[in-house]
Amino acid sequence: MKWRQDPSRYWNPYAAGIALGLVLFGAIFVTGNGLGASGGLARVVAFAEDCVVPSHVDANPHLAPMAGGQNNPLDHRLVWMVLGTILGGFVSGLLAGRTKIETCKGPQVGTGKRWLLAVVGGLLMGYGAGLARGCTSGQALSGGAVLSVGSWAFMMMVFAGGYLFAYPLRKEWN
Amino acid sequence: MAPFQFDYLTATIITLGVGFLFGFVLERAGFGNARNLAAQFYLHDMRVLKVMFTAIVVAMLLTFFASAVGLLDFSRVWVPPTYFWPSVLGGFLLGVGFIIGGYCPGTSLVAVATFKVDGLFYSLGVLLGLAIFGETSPAFWGFFSHAGEAGRLTIFDLLGVDAGFVVLGVAVMAVGAFAFAEIMERVFARPGSEPAPFSLGAKTARRAAVVGAIGLAAATLLIGQPTVERKMVWAREGLDQSIQERKIHIDPAELLGLMHNNQVQTVLVDVRRAGEFNQFHLLDAQNVVPEELTPAWVGKLPKNAVVVVMSNDEFAANDAWKRLAVQLNPNPGKPIVDASRVYVLAGGVNRWLDIYQAGNRDAPSADKAPAGDDSLRHRFAASLGSRVDFARPDAKNAPARQFATKVRAGQAKRQAGGGCG
């Protein structure tokens, strides 16, 4: 059962981990801040809402600090990091020949169902990232490396949630 | 000392570059494909755990080693503040979303960048989830902002030990976790599939990595995280120069202005002996022994407060200033250019009394160091404390003085953290 398109081209996970660790340390050392993804995305959401219903944004305690009044939610480092991440992923995929339009899914699940599950999973993830003030990048990786108590609790719970639902969802992936 | 501060354009370019490398490595690790990520939870390919945990350990080792040897000021590194219960609940939801959707926000960006349709749907789901959170969170705002709130809390602060112990513990734990992951991959290997490629590397490379990681952790522990005293030694040239050039000594009249200014929160720290403090002190000054000016004390300061230290003349105040400057100022090793968060009352309590008790408005300016030996020149018949008008003279009755303003409120902010979320 060959389920990777081209396994030989992925890096050894430990080598990739060392490279990722060096990037993370570089960011911490030079700027004092780690990595992040959901923070930038939250600002994209705030921007969209601010375009449509600015007065509603000003009255919301979650959105107002980002987009209330004259604040430009896109004027933030994490938005630039999101752009960089997309760019870096694209260049790597292009060089490795992995940029092609496709849907990654297990063999037993239809494409439409996979898309639906992707939306549902993303929705839960987005809600969880809002609640936890960060995602796997900002909390688990960056907070984990600087030994934040909340980040380690978060990380344990991510694995707990994943493993708890892995068995009922085995048909989706295997 | 790192971290550094940059102008807007440079900071943007750096962040873009960091993001680029982040995305590049994620893609190379195989995280642009949901199946590689979901495999973690079926135990036949634990690359998520391997990559993430290796990255955390590498960054942790380098961060705390750099801090121990004085290359990095850890107090200026962003530590995601702890909100325990929202983190626990959010983390659980995120984990469930992970196994249903197959990505996390960072990896879904890479999936989108490599044209994975499921990644696009997933990202739209994330945006929708964030929007719903924004709309619903006001309903449980108290839980979100206060449940298990502990501010900047690290595991080593919680345990009350040197960071090195935790660093070593996590490094050892990681080696164990990797060994466990390798065994699991063999036990749960898919029939007919070749073992995960390049899984563990050559034996010598593996050993070198383990020895290197444990060695670096042990070295970090042996050196220890810098104490305030060690930071003062590292920064002594800049500190001495700032004192020598009297960059941080403010005129009594400037301090009086601050005491009357309700836009600036001013914390007055009097480092004299308790007996002298009881005889007379400025209104709202707190009597602190210099050794008590620890990170714990500094941690309780109001955000962006301006601290003014004083003794009878200046010797004790200058020393206390050094202790606070290495903890509060962004670059204590460099002489102050225009912004500090902590100042010294020029001429100390003696000059204050010369002006506001004795009415000598021609007392030396802030550029002049006092001649005295840091003892109280004024005599009091009783312990007055601050129950006299000259403990905080009324602004309109105070003798007018010419002085150069030194305090720049709001400019000496330490680098604001960003983080995620």
Image (cartoon, helix red, strand yellow):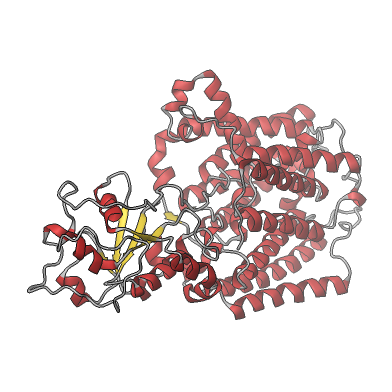
Q: Tell me if residue A151 can be seen.
A: yes
Q: Tell me if residue B188 can be seen.
A: no
Front in this rendered view, residue B82 or A119: B82
Query: In the displayed structure, does residue B35 sit left or right of residue B219?
Result: right
Instruction: Please state, as top left, top right, bottom left or bottom right, where the N terminus of chain B lies in the image.
Output: bottom right
Instruction: Please state, as top left, top right, bottom left or bottom right, where the C terminus of chain B lies in the image.
Output: top right
Query: In the displayed structure, does residue B226 sit left or right of residue A90?
Result: left
Residue lying at 31% horizontally and 74% vertically, measured from the top left: B371
Say above or below: B186 vs B101. Answer: below
Give x and y (percent) for residue A84. Answer: 73, 40
Q: Which residue is outermost to the left?
A: B381
Give x and y (percent) for residue B166. Answer: 58, 71
Give x and y (percent) for residue B32. Answer: 78, 42
Residue A141 sits in which quadrant? bottom right
Q: Which residue is outermost to the bottom?
A: B222
Give x and y (percent) for residue A79. Answer: 64, 37
Query: In the displayed structure, does residue B19 sit left or right of residue B278?
Result: right
Residue lying at 82% horizontally and 71% vertically, measured from the top left: B206
Residue B278 sits in which quadrant? bottom left
Say above or below: B301 vs A92. Answer: below
Say above or below: A133 vs B336. Answer: above
Front in this rendered view, residue A157 or B111: B111
Residue lying at 79% horizontally and 61% vertically, measured from the top left: A14
Q: Which residue is outermost to the top?
A: A52
